Amino acid sequence: MNAMRNPAPRVIAWAKAGLFMLALLPLARLVWLGFSDGLGANPIEFITHSTGTWTLVGLLATLSVTPLRKLSGWNWLLRLRRMLGLFAFFYASLHFVTYIWLDQFFDLSAVLRDVIKRPFITVGFLAFVLLIPLAATSTNAMVKRLGGKNWQRLHRLVYVIAILGVTHYWWLVKKDITQPLIYALILAALLAFRVLLKVNFAGQGGLRKPSLEK
Ligand code: HEM
């Protein structure tokens, strides 16, 4: 049990390497299917859906770190969070590039029209734009430069981004809302956990030092 709470640095390095490989699997799958004619009748739709799904999964996985850490006492999970967040950004970028390149053929006026006129695109676009400063300030040097408090404040945007991401999905589905509902419920649970944590924290007199948590 102690080994799980305080794993050796070597174990954490392996966990990071494993997570990195795991997070590349959806991309590897797309490349494989692309070369083996496996993307179906509408490859653009397939790629858009896959990259969109993995962006959302990446965001929710990032937000799961704090609850998992608090519940298990495995503080080292925090060391995986940056990579999870960056993978969410990576798949969001692929998702956006697929849309702008393969869907809209770099017709920027058509993109702008879409962003203004189609609410699900508006919120998706906003979520992506908000992710950029988080990815840009994800390094240790940027945490230092901004100062822990400011950095923490800025990175709270991830809550807004996740809500926009789920809304984007909810608004784009036409009939069966089961999938976006599942994501919405998971997000609601992850956010509720934080509210409970805060209430509990306040109830204890707020004596604990704030940490760099999202
Ligand atoms: C954090 C940002 C974003 C997240 C989390 C996200 C997530 C998703 C998800 C989960 C899907 C549906 C996948 C499925 O059906 O299985 C999707 C579809 C889509 N997204 Fe995004 N998205 C984001 C940003 C964007 C942006 C910036 C654009 C374009 C400006 C965009 C355009 C689209 C389009 C065109 C579809 C397909 C719609 C359809 O099939 O009718 N998304 N996205």
Image (tube, rainbow, N blue to C red):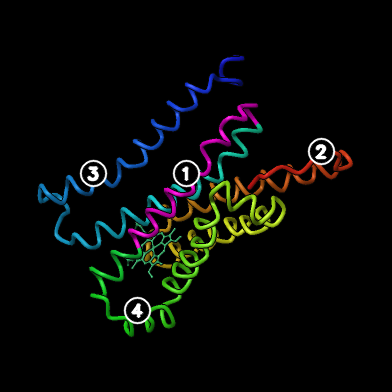
Residue 164: mark:
none
Q: Is mark 1 within 8 Å of ligand 1?
A: no
x 26%, y 75%: residue? 104
Rendering quadrant holding ligand 1: bottom left
The span shown in magenta is 71-95
x 37%, y 63%: residue? 175
Nearer the observer: mark 3 or 2; the answer is 2
Q: Earlier in the sequence, mark 3 or mark 4?
A: 3
Q: Is residue 126 above or below residue 82?
A: below
Residue 29 image position (x, y, % from top left): 23, 44
Residue 13 image position (x, y, % from top left): 46, 28
Looking at the rendered structure, the kind of residue marked 4 is Val
Q: Nearer the viewer, residue 50 or 41?
A: 50
Instruction: From the image, tell me which residue sits under label 4.
Output: 111
Quadrant of the image containing the N terminus: top right
Nearer the observer: mark 3 or 1; the answer is 1
Q: Is residue 195 above or below residue 124?
A: above
Looking at the rendered structure, the kind of residue marked 3 is Arg
